Every structure is written in structure tokens, then in C-alpha cells.
Image (cartoon, rainbow, N blue to C red):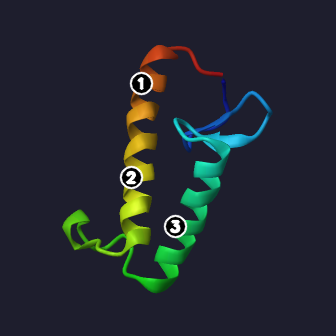
Amino acid sequence: LMFDDEEGFVLDADGNRVLIGLTLEETLEFDRLERHINVTGPFPHITRDEWHSSEEKRWLELWDKHQAAKVTFMRSNKTRH
């Protein structure tokens, strides 16, 4: 994987820009869910415990997966260009 930018994206083996730790499909799903939540709810002004819809829960699942992978990725790549 090649680091793309400060936002937590990498280029996968096929050259697709994906969130660290997520597949292309998961990155697209994350983006779709984020847009849906931003339109339909008070994102991000509520706490995790207040997220009840399946879309909100799935977004959190993908977010947590991305964040965990991002920490590991950043630690293993001490030099960034």
C-alpha cells in the first residue's frame, strides 16, 4: 500500500484510493453511509450511545476498523513522503 494523504487514505494494489484498513467496497460504503447520516441526523453532534439505526452502527463499525488500522499503519511507516 502506498500512503496517499493526511486524511488516512492509501492506494490499494489496483490503484484505488481507499481508507486505511478498508477495502474499496468498504470505503465506498463508508462514504455513502456518512453522506446519509449527515443528511438524516445530527452527525457528529451525538454520542456513540445515541446511534441506533443500522446505518449509524455500520458507519461506526467501519470507522473503528479504519481508526485501528490507521494507528498500526502510522506506527509502521515512520517516514512519510
User: What is the residue that sits farthest to the bottom in this orientation?
Assistant: 40
Q: Is mark 3 on a helix, strand or loop?
A: helix
Would you say the residues marked 3 and 2 are in contact, meaning their CB atoms lie under 8 Å apart? no
Q: Which residue is drawn at 42% across and 51% down?
A: 63
- In the image, what residue type sits under mark 3? Glu
Precedes in sequence: disc 3 or disc 1 = 3
- In the image, what residue type sits under mark 2? Glu
Mark 3 against mark 2, which lies toward the viewer?
Answer: 2
Residue highlighted by disc 2: 61
Residue 20 left/right relative to 41? right
**How far separated are the C-alphas under marks 3 and 2?**
12 Å
> In the figure, 69 relative to 62: above or below?
above
Residue 13 spot, x, y in % from top left: 75, 27
**How far separated are the C-alphas under marks 3 and 1?**
23 Å
Residue highlighted by disc 3: 34
**How far separated are the C-alphas under marks 2 and 1?**
17 Å
Q: Is mark 2 on a helix, strand or loop?
A: helix
Residue 69 left/right relative to 17? left
> In the figure, 22 relative to 76: above or below?
below
**Residue in the foreground of this view, choosing between 54 and 71:** 54
The quadrant of the picture occupied by the C terminus is: top right
Residue highlighted by disc 1: 72
**Residue in the foreground of this view, choosing between 46 and 54:** 54
The quadrant of the picture occupied by the N terminus is: top right
Mark 2 against mark 1, which lies toward the viewer?
Answer: 2
Q: What element carries label 1?
A: helix
Q: Which residue is drawn at 42% across and 19% down?
A: 75
Q: Which residue is drawn at 52% across and 67% down?
A: 34
